[in-house]
Amino acid sequence: MRKLFTAALLFLLAPAARAALFINNTSKCTVQVRVYAHSEKGKACELESKIMTIPSMGTMAFNNAGQVAENPGWEKGMTVAGDPKAAVWDALGFHNGTSTLKVGTGCATVTTGVVKDACGADLNVKWTIAGRNILVELYN
Amino acid sequence: MRKLFIALLLSLSAVGAKAALFITNNTSCIMVVVIRAHDLNHGICGLESGRLQVDPGTSAAFNNVATINTTNPFWINGQTATTSGGTAVWGWDAATVVSLGGTMWAEIGNPGSCFPTASVTTPNACGTNSVTADWTVMGSNTFIDIN
């Protein structure tokens, strides 16, 4: 409830904000992840990125969904339709071989979760709205 | 007041936060950012980075002060940062944001740092557009937003 309230306040604070997506890995393990987004007039999670590899204590920064095309690229020749800055971040997906976790909005039903990382430890995943930006924190 | 309240809520909910620095340039001009920080061996603003070019519509992220030991823009004067002692000992303090070839010279940062102003707006900084550089701490992460 408090989170919803915060999100609502933030939304009021920045109605026209176009969010950057930041991923911060403070876990002890390399993490592989896909990002999901949609074009301005598209459907949630219609865009799926290729796998990104984020080392321990590493970060990823995307000003807008258009930058995903450069690195790591979209799957199956997908592209953002219209203004890349108007595209919307939906979710981050983790797959460790046995289970899948998606955090975010759109096609994700949770904003936090835990998945076993490649080092065998519990990896906490937390999707938050931080002002104009979206921050996903990965930590043990 | 509302911002304070939001910051408070975010800090309460950000258990896993670990003090990264995130920079976003939403303007159509090239921005250059110089970062100031502190650690066990350097006082407030004692660490000074080289010039980080942030292109229009791009973002940059740094996990911790030691990240800049090995990645662009590096610390100048041969400085090396350490994360020993944890986030109680090291932290991001301030930044200078200038528009490449323009008139903007915004100095932003934490209260009590070398640049204690959180938000600076410069008229005609990007063509005829004014540009605002904001320094915001949310949870234990710091955001520089250039809009």
Image: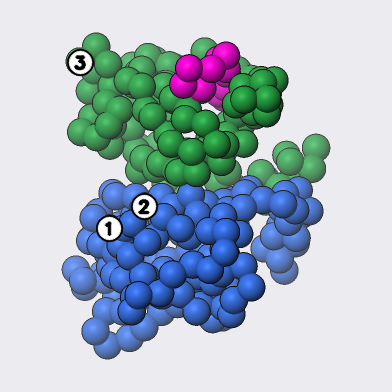
Chain colours: A blue, B green
Query: Are discs 1 and 3 less than 8 Å apart at CB?
Result: no
Callout 2 environment at 10 Å: few (<14), some (14 to 19), or many (20+)?
many
* Residue displayed at 20% across by 15% down: B78
Q: Where's residue B81, x and y in %?
A: 27, 26
For badge 3, the amino acid type reads Gly
Q: In this figure, which residue is indicated by the disc labeled 3? A: B78
Secondary structure type for disc 2 = strand
Q: CA distance from mark 2 to mark 3?
A: 26 Å
- What chain is tagged by disc 1? A
Q: Looking at the picture, does residue A131 appear above or below residue B129?
A: below
Q: Is B36 or A132 nearer to us in this picture?
A: A132
Tell me the magenta residue range. Answer: B98-110
Q: Quadrant of the C terminus of chain B?
A: top right
Q: CA distance from mark 1 to mark 2?
A: 7 Å
* Residue displayed at 57% across by 64% down: A82
Q: Nearer the viewer, mark 2 or mark 3?
A: 2
Answer with left or right where residue B118 lies relative to residue A56.
right
* Residue displayed at 55% across by 46% down: B139
Q: Looking at the picture, does residue B73 appear above or below residue A88?
A: above
Q: In this figure, which residue is indicated by the disc labeled 1? A: A54
